[in-house]
Amino acid sequence: MKSKRFSYGVGALVTFIISLGTAAIIYGSGIIAFDPIGLIAWVLSLLGAYTIIYALRMREDTFYYASWGLIMFAIGLASALYRVMSPLIIFGLLLIVLAIIGLIAYWRKK
């Protein structure tokens, strides 16, 4: 029995559509006032979280997918929290986590 490999693109498209649909429901119902930067936060943070989960689950090109997942998640988080917290704090944390992931990937290859 052959197992099908799960394509990143399919899951990313589903995540993108779900995040847009959720944002449309939230903004359309008036729970949250529409904010274009908030829409970016919805899409990028969920897509980043999916990419990180994909990287941990597939175990191939882990560094690549984890790095891009963290970058998307950090940009989404900074977009959501820019009124409450300085985006520089989030990007500083991103750089630290990326350095740690790079070090772990380097140690795995040795």
Image (spheres, grey):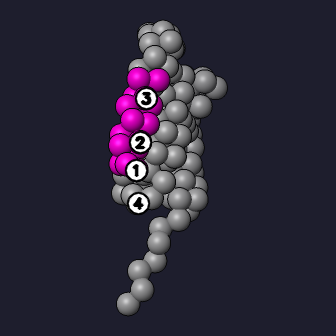
Pointers 3 and 1 in contact (CB under 8 A)?
Answer: no
Closer to the eye: label 2 or 3: 2
Distance from label 1 to label 4 (Cα)? 17 Å
Location of mark 4 (residue): 58
Answer with mark 1 or mark 4, whichever residue precedes in sequence: 4
Closer to the eye: label 1 or 4: 1
The question of residue 78 being in magenta is answered with no
Distance from label 3 to label 1 (Cα)? 16 Å
Closer to the eye: label 2 or 4: 2
Question: Relative to 91, does residue 54 appear above or below in the rendering?
Answer: below
Give the camera-side residue of 105 and 58: 105
Instruction: Residue at 49%, 47% (x, y): give it.
Output: 65
- Image position, residue 74 (x, y; %): 48, 28
Location of mark 1 (residue): 109
Pointers 2 and 1 in contact (CB under 8 A)?
Answer: yes
Give the camera-side residue of 71 and 61: 61
Question: Relative to 53, does residue 98 appear above or below in the rendering?
Answer: above
- Label 3 sits on a secondary structure element that is helix
Q: Which amino acid type is shown beneath numbered disc 2?
A: Tyr
Q: Which residues are magenta?
A: 95-110
Distance from label 2 to label 1 (Cα)? 5 Å
Give the camera-side residue of 2 and 83: 2
Question: Which residue of the protein is positioned furthest toward the right in this rendering?
Answer: 36
Label 3: how many residues lie within 10 Å, few (<14), some (14-19) or many (20+)?
few
Give the camera-side residue of 79 and 32: 79
Location of mark 3 (residue): 99
Instruction: Residue at 37%, 31% (x, y): give it.
Output: 100
Q: Which amino acid type is shown beneath numbered disc 1?
A: Lys
Label 4: how many residues lie within 10 Å, few (<14), some (14-19) or many (20+)?
some
Answer with mark 2 or mark 3, whichever residue precedes in sequence: 3
Label 1: how many residues lie within 10 Å, few (<14), some (14-19) or many (20+)?
few
Location of mark 2 (residue): 106
